[in-house]
Image: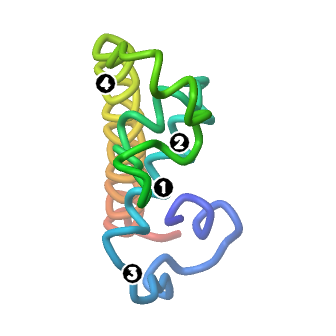
Amino acid sequence: MREDLIRTGRDPADAYIGPWVFHDLRRTCATYLARLGHGVETIDKILNHGCAGGGIGRTINAVTRIYCRHELLTERREALQDFGRRIKQLVSTSEEVEAAAVRASLLPSG
């Protein structure tokens, strides 16, 4: 968000993040995992979705869930590692932009 503000010539100090809940983090993670190319089955397992029907997932067909007992542990690990790398990239980029802005403000003008 800071990068977007800086790129468009607005002040990052004006940035505002409204109230949020833990569920927002789950939604963000699921969205990024899909953007990174991970399948809905893997995302479903990571979110550990269940419903009133005894823990049967909501995105995977109930019959498939009953017969396919593979836990997708390797896929889940890879997906979460990809997500972690993306978060590090976003934080790193944000810190670099902020550091550059600070350096620029310390330079004498004129």
Q: Earlier in the sequence, mark 3 or mark 2?
A: 3
Mark 1 element type: helix
- Image location (x, y in percent) of residue 14: 50, 88
Residues under labels 3 and 1: Cα distance?
Answer: 12 Å
Residues under labels 3 and 2: Cα distance?
Answer: 17 Å
Q: What's the mark number on residue 28? A: 1
The residue singled out by tag 4 in the image is: 81
**Pointers 2 and 4 in contact (C-beta within 8 Å):** no
Q: Earlier in the sequence, mark 4 or mark 3?
A: 3
Q: Earlier in the sequence, mark 1 or mark 4?
A: 1
Residues under labels 2 and 4: Cα distance?
Answer: 12 Å
Q: Identify the image's colour scheme: rainbow, by chain, secondary structure or one colour.
A: rainbow
The front one of 80 and 65 is 65
The residue singled out by tag 2 in the image is: 32
Q: Count of labels shown? A: 4
Q: Earlier in the sequence, mark 2 or mark 4?
A: 2
The amino acid type, in three-letter code, at marker 1 is: Thr
- Tell me which residue sits at (34%, 44%) in the image: 48
- Image location (x, y in percent) of residue 59: 59, 42
